[in-house]
Image: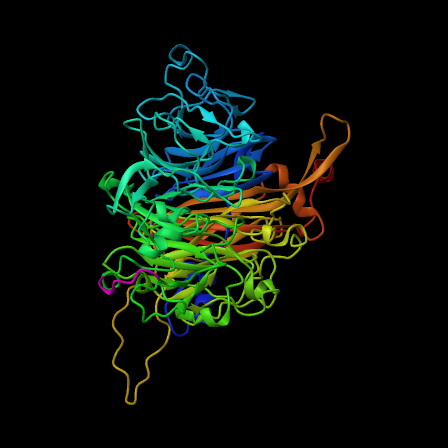
């Protein structure tokens, strides 16, 4: 698997790092880049067309591709953007959503109610598919079409869509059975967004929402299943546990009924159209699956007294090594008890004491009991536990009371908080747990206690990203290196770096301010940052947001997909000496990029760029342009604000360079006249410097193209010639 290149080092980021990281190493994130756009040829000029809307983003491990759900020119579906070339290709049409992507970007899993492989898929329910991007899809009007019957004649390269929710051992589509009142087009199978596919693209994990024949025999709803795309095997993950033998039976977990509601192996899925989260996650190496389980006593070990009287609707994250075969046990990531603790087994304890205490060897991390039936009491956030590359580290949300925090005395948690747990090394569940956030006070104030809505974990397990309206994080174990906003606005994206014990607010306006609050009245916490996703190295983070001030010129008034790169800065605290300090060691020149701009009288802009050596230097200027578009064929046109590339320049830097390069940016022909208007044309310039064996460097600055000398028309030129004669 190819390793991602290191990040650019930005001069503006350096200043931010020095201001906020005085006591510890800190993560600094560079300028935010809008990626939900595609190049479009307009005459001789290639411009960037911004998507009408985009979300549910995920990035390939190698950092080459970003996939998202969105719409271009009225055509909806899932799209894949090549971050090196800018090319955009549709992955799947229509209502497809919840994409996950393989490490090299070739395979994309998703869920759709559309029958994309009609030769196998005969139901009208949502099903899980994989698209092989090396096989082209047939298109009509820019949208992918389903494969046709008798594909070998119509599509000699093979159908690009592979049905995942298929019967074990075959490619045959599933038959679902529905209780009275359920609608076929809304309940079938669903794969989680961003975390359902292994890095190789070989394995996809998903959840059923209706009874099916996926295992070749009747399979209850709410099971977690794994599909091997090489062998066409569909295997059961959420296997039933036998407390008498302490082993898995290999049978599905049957549905049970409590208080008129049914409960199964996994947290129930929302109807497909409302499903933002659901299913399960699989580790990048394909070894491990995690899900938010219900019917815990039917899947994992409890204390003997709990096993007899547990509540079916109680939920907590479950974890299983699927590569160890059908005998591998399902383990609890965390919970109210810890029967796996050897000291607990030696104690002979059958139930927890009524007063939670960490002195009890059977006590788990959380204080649970009637009337608390949930470790996580939410359906509005990402309830799917997230796994590191090898499955050893699990990130998850919990709203129950943590015993170590004294919350069994202070009362219940008002909202969910972020935790990680280690599943290796023989740790007890209390010692394996680490809390990363806690509420800051008044639960009615979103800046203190807003829910955490979405999360992801980096492959190496050292970073966790999450989104929330919350702005204050009083837990003292992490150093907050970002300015604290006094008021909650849109959801922001935060990054926790466990290697240097810091928390950083990633999202910010292009002038440094927080996300705006203009959209907060239209759903409040439902708006802002979402769908964070790390590259393999953890240095690139993609996400979506409907904040309109993250990138200059964002004018679609809807959600977009963004990318931001991380750079590491070391300890900035200077050592103190009583006597003269020792001589400093020789330091190699820092690989950095600096730039300044000088406006020319003719409207051009000259960039003075300090480069670190030989390589390739490129500059692109983007600006918000008012576009006149006909409305549904009517004579009247409407004006839209769209981000366009208005100028660009490229230069090869020779090995003998003095370190200073000049680039001249002149507005492309369609935009040249805009330099003559009052105030000129404000633009954002992105500089990229690449050199073999070195990290790519990026820098950004604002310029304005403004003509300050008179323009000679063709008529003026003729008059001048006549005068000379």
The percent coordinates of residue 368 (x first, y second) are 43, 61
Locate residue 629, reporting x and y percent.
69, 33
Residue projecting furthest to the bottom:
578
Q: Residue furthest right?
A: 636
Residue closest to the eye, 563 or 277 = 277
The answer to which of 582 and 392 lies nearer the viewer is: 392
Residue lying farthest to the top in this orientation: 153
Q: Is residue 144 above or below residue 226?
A: above
Q: Magenta stretch containing residue 347, yes or no? A: yes
Residue 63 left/right relative to 452: left
Give the residues drawn in magenta, as a range. 346-351
Mark yes or no: residue 462 visible.
no
Can the viewer see residue 451 in this picture? yes
Kindly identify the residue that appears in the image at 30 percent across and 24 percent down. Answer: 169
Residue 669, image x and y in percent? 60, 37
The residue depicted at 40 percent of the width and 10 percent of the height is 153
Residue 201 in the image: x percent, y percent?
33, 35
Total numbered labels: 0
- Colour scheme: rainbow
Q: Quadrant of the C terminus?
A: top right
Question: In percent of the image, x 61 and y 65: which residue is there?
Answer: 445
Where is the N terminus found, in terms of image quarters? top left
Does residue 640 belong to the magenta stretch? Answer: no
The main secondary structure of the magenta stretch is: loop
Task: Tell me where residue 199 sits by quadrant.
Answer: top left
Front position in the image: 594 or 632: 632
């Amino acid at each position: 698997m190819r390793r991602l290149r290191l990040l650019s080092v930005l001069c503006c980021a350096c200043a931010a790092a020095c201001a906020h990281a005085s006591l510890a190493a800190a993560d600094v994130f560079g300028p935010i880049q809008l990626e939900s756009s595609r190049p479009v040829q307009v005459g001789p000029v290639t411009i960037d067309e911004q998507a009408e809307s985009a979300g549910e983003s995920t990035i390939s491990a190698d950092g080459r591709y970003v996939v998202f759900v969105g719409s271009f020119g009225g055509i909806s579906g899932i799209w894949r953007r090549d971050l090196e070339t800018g090319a955009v290709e549709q992955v799947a049409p229509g209502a497809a959503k919840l994409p996950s992507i393989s490490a090299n970007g070739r395979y994309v899993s998703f869920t759709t109610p559309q029958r994309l492989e009609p030769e196998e898929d005969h139901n009208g329910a949502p099903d899980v598919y994989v698209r092989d991007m090396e096989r082209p899809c047939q298109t009509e009007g820019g949208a992918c079409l389903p494969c046709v019957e008798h594909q070998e004649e119509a599509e000699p390269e093979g159908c690009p869509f592979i049905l995942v929710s298929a019967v074990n051992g075959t490619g045959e589509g599933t038959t679902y059975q529905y209780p009275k009142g359920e609608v076929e087009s809304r309940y079938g199978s669903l794969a989680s967004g961003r975390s359902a596919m292994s890095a190789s693209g070989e394995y996809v994990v998903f959840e059923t929402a209706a009874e099916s024949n996926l295992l070749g025999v009747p399979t209850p709803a709410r099971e977690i299943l794994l599909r091997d795309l090489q062998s066409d095997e569909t295997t059961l993950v959420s296997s039933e546990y036998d407390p008498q033998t302490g082993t898995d039976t290999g049978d599905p977990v049957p549905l049970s009924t409590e208080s008129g509601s049914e409960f199964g192996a996994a947290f129930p899925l929302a109807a497909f159209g409302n499903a933002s989260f659901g299913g399960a996650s699989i580790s990048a190496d394909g070894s491990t699956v995690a899900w938010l389980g219900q019917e815990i006593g039917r899947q994992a070990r409890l204390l003997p007294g709990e096993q007899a009287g547990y509540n079916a609707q109680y939920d907590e994250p479950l974890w299983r090594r699927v590569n160890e075969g059908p005998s591998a046990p399902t383990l609890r990531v965390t919970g109210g008890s810890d029967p796996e603790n050897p000291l607990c087994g030696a104690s002979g304890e059958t139930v927890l004491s009524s007063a939670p205490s960490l002195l009890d060897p059977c006590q788990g991390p959380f204080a649970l009991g009637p009337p608390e039936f949930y470790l996580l009491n939410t359906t509005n956030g990402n309830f799917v536990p997230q796994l590191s590359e090898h499955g050893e580290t699990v990130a998850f949300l919990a709203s129950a009371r943590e015993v170590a925090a004294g919350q069994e005395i202070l009362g219940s948690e008002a909202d969910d908080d972020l935790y990680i747990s280690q599943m290796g090394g023989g740790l007890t569940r209390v010692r394996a747990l680490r809390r990363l956030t806690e509420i800051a006070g008044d639960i009615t104030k979103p800046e203190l206690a807003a829910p955490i809505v979405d999360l992801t974990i980096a492959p190496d397990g050292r970073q966790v990203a999450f989104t929330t309206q919350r702005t204050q994080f009083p837990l003292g174990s992490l150093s907050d290196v970002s300015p604290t906003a006094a008021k909650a606005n849109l959801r922001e994206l935060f990054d926790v770096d466990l290697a240097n014990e810091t928390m950083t607010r990633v999202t910010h306006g292009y002038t440094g301010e927080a996300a705006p609050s203009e959209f907060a009245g239209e759903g409040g916490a439902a708006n802002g940052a979402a769908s964070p996703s790390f590259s393999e190295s953890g240095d690139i983070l993609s996400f979506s947001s409907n904040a309109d001030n993250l990138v200059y010129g964002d004018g679609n008034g809807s959600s977009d997909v963004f990318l931001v790169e991380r750079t590491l800065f070391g300890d900035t605290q200077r050592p103190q000496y009583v006597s003269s300090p020792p001589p400093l060691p020789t330091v190699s020149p820092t690989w950095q990029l600096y730039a300044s701009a000088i406006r020319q009288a003719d409207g051009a802009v000259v960039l003075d760029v300090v480069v670190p050596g030989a390589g390739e230097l490129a500059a692109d200027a983007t600006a918000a342009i008012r576009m006149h578009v006909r409305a549904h064929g009517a004579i009247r046109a409407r004006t839209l604000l769209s981000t366009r590339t208005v100028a660009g320049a490229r230069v090869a830097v020779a090995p003998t360079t003095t370190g200073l390069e000049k680039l001249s940016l002149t507005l492309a022909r369609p935009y040249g006249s805009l330099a003559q208007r009052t105030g000129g044309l404000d633009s954002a310039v992105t500089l990229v410097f690449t050199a073999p064996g070195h990290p790519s460097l990026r820098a950004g600055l604002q310029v304005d193209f403004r003509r300050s000398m008179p323009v000679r028309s063709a008529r003026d030129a003729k008059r001048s010639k006549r005068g000379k004669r």
